[in-house]
Amino acid sequence: MSYVRMTQIVDELAERETARIRLGKGRFQAMMEAIEVIEPLFANAPHGVMGLTPAFIAAPDASYLIIDLASGTGNALHFGQLTLTTVDLVTIGGELFVRNVDNGAILGAMNEVATTRYVARPNAWLDQAHPLRQAAYEGLVYASPANGCSLLHTRFALPLSGPALRHPAFQRMVDFAKSVLADEQPELKVLKGFDAALRTVSEPLVALEAEVAALMTVASNRYDPHAWDADLVTLMQRHDWSWHVSDDLAEQAAEDQQVISGRLNALPLEVAMAFLGSAGHRGHAWRPALRILMDQPEVLPLAA
């Protein structure tokens, strides 16, 4: 294993992570400014289209623009992506379904669950395994400031056509939706800029992560972590690497990570790399373990 390459990887990961954090903070602010522009559209219709009758919501000529300001997984508020999805309704086998206009994909059924506000649902429908809920398209249910599920609303459904347009409040939503599709909303333009910058910073991480995985494999073939520190292997395997975003056992997890950091940094770099596999059994848990190695004594002088 090349110490030089290892330090290059650590250095680039650190630089890109720093850039992601900076851009993520900017993205979050841009997202909040976009919310400030969108939420007033719901002043006279807090439930949005979900305030309409089921017959109006599921009218055959209805179509909607779904604005998701933070699409993605993990910390999507900071690192997600703006997505704009236009949907309409299509009849298949005598039943109404929601279709993605751009690619024709069927997204779910426009059934009773899809047209009932979350707070008004019977208890049986709260079960995600309920057949009606499994079949339903729920993209409209959670897409208004009064969805009853979240304090921060980042998903909005705006009508584009259908009987909703008979009400002035919904006509204002239509006008806004059309301006969004025409790329005329400055706040969303700013958000798109941050998203593009985040993609530029984040996309090379795929190749870097593949290289880290290869280095981990090489190190594991050369060194047996159990032979060096079996207790550390056990600790890394049971450690909650997501403790910093969870309230569960956070204090104990923080103490465990201090112990892990001390023991990893006491090992030669090549040997420490072999231990990263002990953290990698749950998704990308080796990432925070690798960050610990960014402070490894052998790395700091070479990466400076």
Image (tube, rainbow, N blue to C red):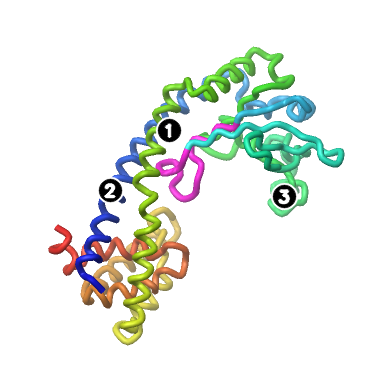
- Helix, strand or loop under label 3: helix
Considering every residue shown, the one lying at the far bottom of the view is: 227
Most extreme residue toward the right is 94
- x, y percentage for residue 103? 64, 39
Mark earlier in primary sequence (1, 2): 2
Choose mark 1 or mark 2, whichever is in front.
Answer: 1
In the rendering, at what x and y percent does residue 301 appear? 13, 63
Q: Which residue is at the front of the view, 69 or 41?
A: 69
Identified by mark 3, the residue type is: Gln
Q: Nearer the viewer, residue 232 or 254?
A: 232
**Alpha carbons under labels 3 and 2: distance apart:** 40 Å
Estimate the x, y position of residue 114 in percent, counting from the top left: 72, 38
Q: Earlier in the sequence, mark 3 or mark 2?
A: 2
Per the image, the residue denoted by label 3 is 134
Which residue is identified by label 2? Answer: 18
Cα separation, mark 1 vs mark 3, equals 32 Å
Q: Which three-letter amino acid code belongs to the residue tagged 2?
A: Thr
In the rendered image, the quadrant that contains the C terminus is: bottom left
Q: Position of residue 1 (x, y in %)?
A: 26, 74
Residue 161 placement, left or right of 276: right
Q: Nearer the viewer, residue 40 or 62?
A: 62
Residue of label 1 = 192
Q: Is residue 170 above or below residue 5?
A: above
Report the residue at 35% width, 79% height from top.
220
- Considering the numbered disc 1 on the image, is that residue within a helix, a strand or a loop? helix
